[in-house]
Amino acid sequence: MVRPPPGAPRKRVLPSASEIVAFVRQSPSAVGQREIARAFNLAPADRPVLREMLRQIERSGTIARAANRRLVGGMALPELTVVERVGTDEDGIPLVSPVGWPGPDPAPLLRLAEEGGEPLPAGARAAARLVMLDTGEIEARLIRRLASSSERVVGIFEKDRKGGRVLAADRRSKAEYRVAELAAGGAVEGELVVAEILAGTRFGLPRAQIVERLGRASDPGAISLLAIASFAIPTEFPADVIAEADAAAPVDLFGRVDLRDLPLMTIDGSDARDFDDAVWAEPDPDPANPGGWHLVVAIADVAWYVRPDSALDREAERRGNSVYFPDRVVPMLPEALSDELCSLKPGFDRACIAAHLWIDSAGHKRCHRFVRALMRSAARLTYDEVQAINDGQCPSPAAVSTSGIEALYGAFAALARARATRGALELELREDRVVLDDGGRPVAVLPIPRLDSHRLIEEFMILANVAAAEELEARHQPCMYRIHDAPDPEKIAALQDFLDESGIPGLALAKGQAPKPEMFNRLLRRAGDTPVAPLVNELVLRCQAQAAYSSNNIGHFGLALRRYAHFTSPIRRYADILVHRALIAGANAAGTAFGAGGLPPRFRSEHLAAVGEHISATERRAAAAERAALERYRATLLADSIGGTFAARISGIADFGLFVTLLATGADGLVPISTLWSDRYDRREKPPRLVGRRFGGVFRLGDPITVRLVEADPIRGRLLFRIEGEKTSERGGRGKRRS
């Protein structure tokens, strides 16, 4: 393919099949429909035609042969391979990893497509075919399960005279395993366990032996332990990693800028466990920038301690990120670093990389400068405290002046104007926190108020992240971008179908236009005062592509930014450590003596591509584990309310029933279609709904309903409801027409 010279106008021309295959084969990283569309400058309207062309090429086998030449971490992925289940992503899809990965980098995490039946347990192995999807992802498609003594299942132990049984804790599974008395490992009734599946038998339940006891299901902390085991999240650090962390020492001022007199402050939630960012602001004294601001965002210099190819580095890369639960954190780094030397605690000298940022009165960045520094946090404040100080409801602490807080909010107001001007996506989504008593037991799940102090820190961090990406591009350094693709046109069409069905005037999307965040913002504003506002926010979110890490920059659709990287949380995200290293390497290459800890020679685009795929998958795994724990906490709290009625709305339609969300608590559950006895219902696609065969009753997305809680299963995090007023029967049969 001959590319036009830089700056030349590009015409929209559909590529030929041979050009597509050549592009796929020559690409150094995974490509799919979206990458091909960008390379050939195709509009969204061209994608259906492109999709059909790709299907024809795939049927011919050419794409498969090209995919076999695909490099991940410098290693070619075979078409057929053995994979092992290592967890689940946030959509509930199993994640697998190729067995015996020979490369120097971590084995890639792939989504596994299963064709019905029981899901592959954690640790189980299977033969799979690797297929390149239109999205550019590589999917593993299960061919057959393989017998292996390493297959494991997480569940609850029920004791009986012959030993007992393990009931799988996966909400999608009803699997049971027989455990002989000698294989129970001392487990007691009602205990959460990890069991190893044994060679099968032709009759009866499959057999297993217990290899790990997690504690009683009723114990405080059991929910987090269950999520950790179910998603195979590593918790124990190897001895050499602990040794490196314990040997780390505080830094001195040599080679660093002294920022200890600057009253930087950390602002986090009241339950925050690590503090890796601090902020400060002042009106810009430059007369050429009237109304402008000078900001400093100081970030823990984790790269000083986590050197490339060290034991700490390899373990941090393997974990990818920290995982947070209401009662604990599974850190990416040992506590000697995450809770001590790298945590910006008040009154302690700490190594940092500080971004000096200058903005004008409209919030646009004028310039920036990065320095390696030594800082001393003046105060550890919470979002609630900062908001109360700004609102005049309480005095500021002695170490932080009221004028310092006012300067933060002044700079934030400018950044908020810039955000509105560029049209970043403005979703209003509920975020909850679990309230625990002194014994670690849940007492409530409450929504987190969205304060201006939250938005302030968010905008400061976004500005610093943009500056980091721009700095790396200017230095011609490799960058781990945080990317967010434009929504798929098919998902936008599905959203439009729902809006048409809602019957609410003014709820529509502009047709024939390339999707932009502002298009969705207009819709969200129109829906703001309607009963379907929460659902519209959720459906707009479902339209969006999944954010990911990549060395190939495609911009960030949701933030309406052309370049964006994660720089501000290196204690809990490996991506940020990589960005820090690249900044250090870039500064050293420019002769600014930024210090040690930069990029190793092997750190090239191929390595970045593999790491990007890996840490994107570990991020999805962490999000899924955190969400699964929240669902179990909700089910635990509702277990005492069996038979109670709740106001709800329909949030999803499936062949097997209705997904509902309780308005008061945000808990999600299922109304099985088998309980709808007033008629027999069929699922329709556009828009999704259940339609009665006999009487024509319809259940639609967003419909308000009253439901009665029938079952709450804290172990599986499952809630079952029936719609109040429906005629139900245990045996089945047809009821009367729904009024």
Image (cartoon, rainbow, N blue to C red):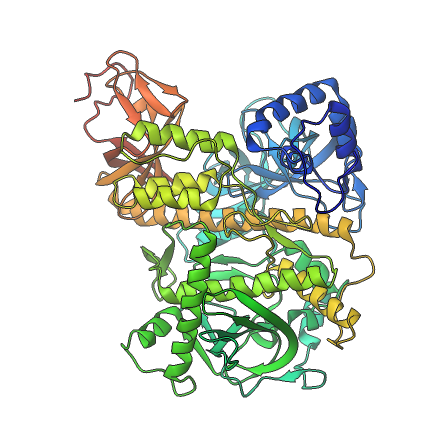
Work out whether residue 539 or residue 678 is closer to the camera in this orientation and state it: 539
Q: Which is nearer the eye, 507 or 428?
A: 507
123 up-or-down from 279: above or below:
above
Q: Residue at x 67, y 27 (%)?
A: 14
Which image quadrant: the N terminus? top right
640 sits left or right of 269 in the view: left
Q: Residue 467: x and y, percent?
A: 60, 64
Placement of 354 over or under 163, stated as above or below? below
Q: Quadrant of residue 397?
A: bottom left
From the viewer's perspective, tell me whether residue 71 is left or right of residue 361: right
Residue that sits furthest to the left in the current view = 739
- Tell me if residue 674 comes above or below residue 470 in the rendering: above
Position of residue 139 relative to residue 287, above or below, is: above
Which quarter of the picture shows residue 499? top left
Number of on-image labels: 0
Task: Locate the C terminus and report the quarter of the image it occupies.
Answer: top left
- Dividing the picture into quadrants, the one containing residue 727 is top left
Measured as percent of width and height from the top left, residue 411 is found at 44, 71
Residue closer to the observer: 730 or 415: 415
Residue 269 appears in the rendering: no
Front-most of residues 430 and 706: 430
Residue 281: % across, % down: 48, 77
For this orientation, the residue located farthest to the top is 694
| Residue drawn 52% across the image and 85% down it | 347
Q: Residue furthest right?
A: 601
Q: Is residue 254 left or right of residue 527?
A: right
- Residue 398 makes an appearance in the image: yes
Q: Residue 247 in the image: x percent, y percent?
A: 70, 76
